[in-house]
Amino acid sequence: MKKLSFVSLFILVLFMNQSMSQVVDEKANSILDRVSVKMKSYTSMKIEFTYTIDNKAEKIHQSKTGVVSIKGDKYSLMIQKQRIISDGKTVWTYIPDANEVQINNVNTKDDEALNPAKLLATYSKNYRAKLVKEVNQGGVMSQIVDLVPIKGKAFFKVRLMIDKTKLQVLSTEIYNKNGSTYAYKVNKFTPNSKVLDTEFSFKASDFPGVEINDMR
């Protein structure tokens, strides 16, 4: 499964080109700008989430839980025992069943999907944003914002649900052109969590006998 499928987390997510001759949704932009400012104020964050993929035509429904820690451009993701670690320049993907680690350079286009702060910081350059509606979800007033890519991507829309008061992303749904929908629901969000820099690098000595597949 591709890295984008994982947390394109959370969130996954967001953007618009103001130079294009299209109607600008100032309300949607204002919401995303305020969420972006809030995200940038955190030194780090830890997100526990549920990831779901659905494809009705293929009769696919899968659900997994995971956790990601983010600090600047660095992240450490755990999902179904698989680990994806990045120090901002290199990405290590450890596959426990094969005791193998794949090493790649960071792909900024895919990598941004794992970092909501990075996505929000660049949304105005890459997507058109639209405020769909406000809804009350279990007593929490939430705002639903759709983002449509300006340039071609594998997906045609991203839908965000944002806590209006806390300015936090509650869920992200990515609609792929192949008919699949990737959903990321935030179960727990911890800002300014204590994260050591050692969590963002892979040490082969910690995995005896690991097969190293350097794809850089």
Image: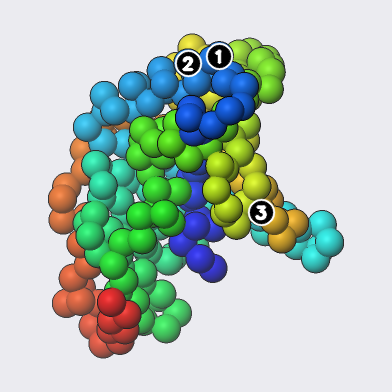
Q: Which mark is residue 27?
A: 1
Name the residue type under label 3: Asn
- Residue 20, image x, y percentages: 54, 31
Q: 124 or 77, which is in the foreground?
A: 124
Question: Marks 2 and 3: CB-CB under 8 Å?
Answer: no
Left or right placement of residue 70 versus residue 138 in this view: left
Q: Quadrant of residue 214?
A: bottom left
Question: Marks 1 and 2: CB-CB under 8 Å?
Answer: yes
How many angstroms separate mark 1 from mark 3 (CA)? Answer: 26 Å
- Residue 182, image x, y percentages: 63, 51
- Residue 79, image x, y percentages: 46, 58
Q: Compared with residue 120, is residue 137 higher up or lower down, i.e. above or below?
A: above
Name the residue type under label 1: Lys
Question: Marks 1 and 3: CB-CB under 8 Å?
Answer: no
Q: Quadrant of the C terminus?
A: bottom left
Residue at label 3? 176
- Residue 78, image x, y percentages: 40, 57
